[in-house]
Image (cartoon, rainbow, N blue to C red):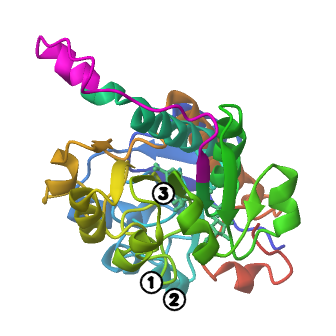
Amino acid sequence: MAPITIRSVLISESVDPRCRAVLEENGIRVTERPNMKTEELMAEIQNYDGLVVRSATKVTADIINATDNLKIIGRAGTGVDNVDVDAATKKGVIVMNTPSGNTISAAELTCIMLMNLSRNVPQATMSMKQGNWDRKKFMGSELFGKVLGIVGLGRIGKEVASRMQSFGMKTIGYDPITPPEVSASWGVEQMSLEKLWPQCDYITVHTPLMPSTVGLLSDETFALCKRGVKVVNCARGGIIDEAALLRALESGQCGGAGLDVFVEEPPKDRSLVNHPNVISCPHLGASTKEAQARCGEDIALQIVDMVKGKNLIGAVSQTFLVFAPKTLPK
Ligand SMILES: NC(=O)c1ccc[n+]([C@@H]2O[C@H](COP(=O)([O-])OP(=O)(O)OC[C@H]3O[C@@H](n4cnc5c(N)ncnc54)[C@H](O)[C@@H]3O)[C@@H](O)[C@H]2O)c1
């Protein structure tokens, strides 16, 4: 792979200090300027070869097209929803993310959602704070012996499976790419979605958001589930159709939902958040000190590896094909 020269990087958000340290240790000049307005970023970006963001900076086509100097946009996190990858690809700018830095944190939050759905801890806490002592209202059920359906058996799906197996849950799943023998080796029996839906007491989704996963849980698929099924979405808003979920909660077809992500963030329509059987978080899957430190360090190391022509990890734009025809990202 041909080395790419990166002399200067702009960090436009609060990213773990390890990011700056690693870049500087490798001779790259770093400027941190959080909270810039779009116009300020468009002017400032002219002076840098690289840009590092988390999720607040919207790297639009206008920003990408405002400079001919930019060579790389690094996102310290999983996914590149806030970067216009097509515009970057057209302009020859590499877009990178840190796909594994958040895995454990997102998996742990998913497990916390599953546990809270079984025992109503958030609702009981709110009731206690209001001065109540209501023991009947919050009767729960054990996770032990229940069936957990995991749709999407990648990094996070796998970690969720092993953790929930320790609670005695039976884990079944579906993934079009992960081979059944591989998921079987970590205790997840794969089957078609038609077979999976009616067996599950709990369902958690861990796929990317793309046309084939939008509305994986919909009116049609909720109807195939066990009455009272509980669902978790700590992946991306829209994988569970929000309007269908509300209808299923109201009819009792869905017994509860744990949501970390929404189609619109923050959601203007609060019907789901306000539903008594919904527990929710403001997209906190990656919000741990450990995940942020890992992602900050990972993005810096990935940029340095690329500069040294060693490796190209986490690249999502097609640009890498121009620079490194034999180096495919994992
Ligand atoms: N809440 C958060 O803050 C947070 C943090 C990290 C990741 N995420 C999200 O979690 C999701 C999973 O992340 P990951 O790191 O495990 O990704 P991954 O790429 O490791 O795994 C995704 C899996 O989904 C599978 N898949 C694709 N299409 C599918 C389909 N139609 N049906 C079933 N499976 C399908 C893929 O084959 C892959 O194995 C992503 O959407 C990611 O953006 C959210």
The residue drawn where x is 64% and y is 81% is 319
Which label belongs to residue 87? 1
Element carrying mark 3: loop
Q: Position of residue 210 (x, y in %)?
A: 49, 78
Q: Which residue is drawn at the image coordinates 68% and 35% (left, top)?
A: 168
**Magenta-drawn stretch, dominant element (helix, strand or loop):** loop
Check disc 2 and report its element: helix, strand or loop.
helix
Give the quadrant of residue 264. bottom left
Where does the image place residue 15, in percent across and percent down from the top left? 47, 40
Residue 276 falls inside the magenta stretch? no
| Quarter of the N terminus within the rendering | bottom right
Q: Which mark is residue 235?
A: 3
Res 217 → quadrant: bottom left
Q: CA distance from mark 2 to mark 3?
A: 28 Å
> Mark 2 belongs to which amino acid?
Lys
- Disc 3 within 8 angstroms of ligand 1 (CB): yes
> Disc 3 marks which amino acid?
Ala
Residue 90, numbered label: 2
Spatial CA distance of label 1 from label 3 is 25 Å
**In the rendered view, does 229 fall on the left or right side of 100?**
left
